[in-house]
Amino acid sequence: MKKIWTALFIFAAATAFAQDTCSELCGSCLDNNESGPCAKVEEICKCTEMIANLKAVLQSDASDKTATESVYESNVQTATAENRQAQDQSYENAVFWMGFSIAYESFMEQMEGDVRVDEFYHHLGINAGAVLRWDLYHWLSFITGINAIYHYAEYSQTLAYHRHGENNNILYNNIMVEIPLQFRFALSFEKTKIRPFISASTHIRKPIYVWSDTEVFWKDFDNKGGMYSFLDWEFMEYLGLGIELNRHVAILWQPLLYSIRTNAYKKSNPYDNGLDTWRLGMEFTW
């Protein structure tokens, strides 16, 4: 048994030595394989066959490498596409959004406190705050938040209790906070991120502070200011038209449908409806 293993070992060593020797001899005869010694090397070592096999192995390795690289690149592209698709799907399925909003308000106020207004000269409203949005369905959203509001107006009133019924001018400023409650109904298009929508909103406002300068008979000024009562509230009903851009930006125009102002004494409709009182706002959410 020991002799058999010894013979096998000698045979393997001789074969390996012969292969190494043939490789060296064939390499020496690549450019001169027709000479006598090289012809003998070709006959013994089969150099042509050996070189052909080596080229085949190298080509096979190159093909395998190319195939591996191609598969790798394909996998990378597929993974990138799947990640992008997953991000898009996650974006489409997002339920909760938060951000901030700004708005310009144009208003025609019928009353300043308990006194009816005759004519407006200037009016300006600025509205800004935080916004929260829940997408209940792909076509329906609910929006709320909290806003701070500043109103400035200049108008006149008739002083009926004076003997000639003269007018006075009032420069009026007030600060309020509000909570909007809005339902938004949108249209979706597959090939665009622009979504037109309509909205119905109730804005619950709490007046905080007011100050005014009153010019009586064009010569005297009466300056007043103070906190509103806890019973002073405003309720605004808006209808809106707008568009959403990529779900992150919304532009909304809202004309007033109806308004109610309450205080300790009575309820009133303080603002002119329709195109006389409206707001133009933008929302930024993520």
Image (spheres, rainbow, N blue to C red):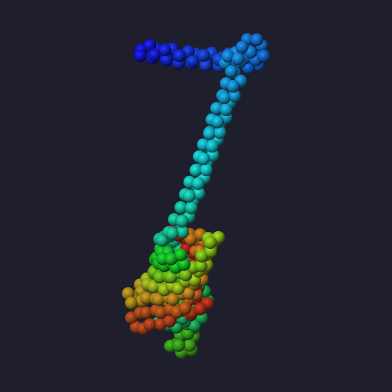
Residue shown at the point (48%, 74%) measured from the top left: 239
Is residue 148 visible from the viewing direction of this image? no
Quarter that holds the N terminus: top left
Residue shown at the point (41%, 73%) measured from the top left: 202
Q: Position of residue 87 (x, y in %)?
A: 46, 53
Where 41 sits versus 100, above or below? above
Q: Position of residue 3 (x, y in %)?
A: 38, 11
Most extreme residue toward the bottom is 163
Q: Position of residue 166 (x, y in %)?
A: 49, 85
Is 112 in front, or is 230? 230
Where 137 sits versus 215, above or below? above
Quarter that holds the C terminus: bottom left
Residue shown at the point (53%, 64%) measured from the top left: 189
Is 262 in front, or is 209? 262
Is 222 in front, or is 173? 173
Is 28 in front, or is 94? 28
Where 118 sits versus 240, above or below? below
Q: Position of residue 15 (x, y in %)?
A: 49, 15
Residue shown at the point (33%, 75%) measured from the top left: 229
Q: Tell me which corner region of the image, top left, top right, bottom left or bottom right, holds residue 267.
A: bottom left
Q: How many marks?
A: 0
Side of 280 where 95 appears, left or right: left
Is residue 43 visible from the viewing direction of this image? yes
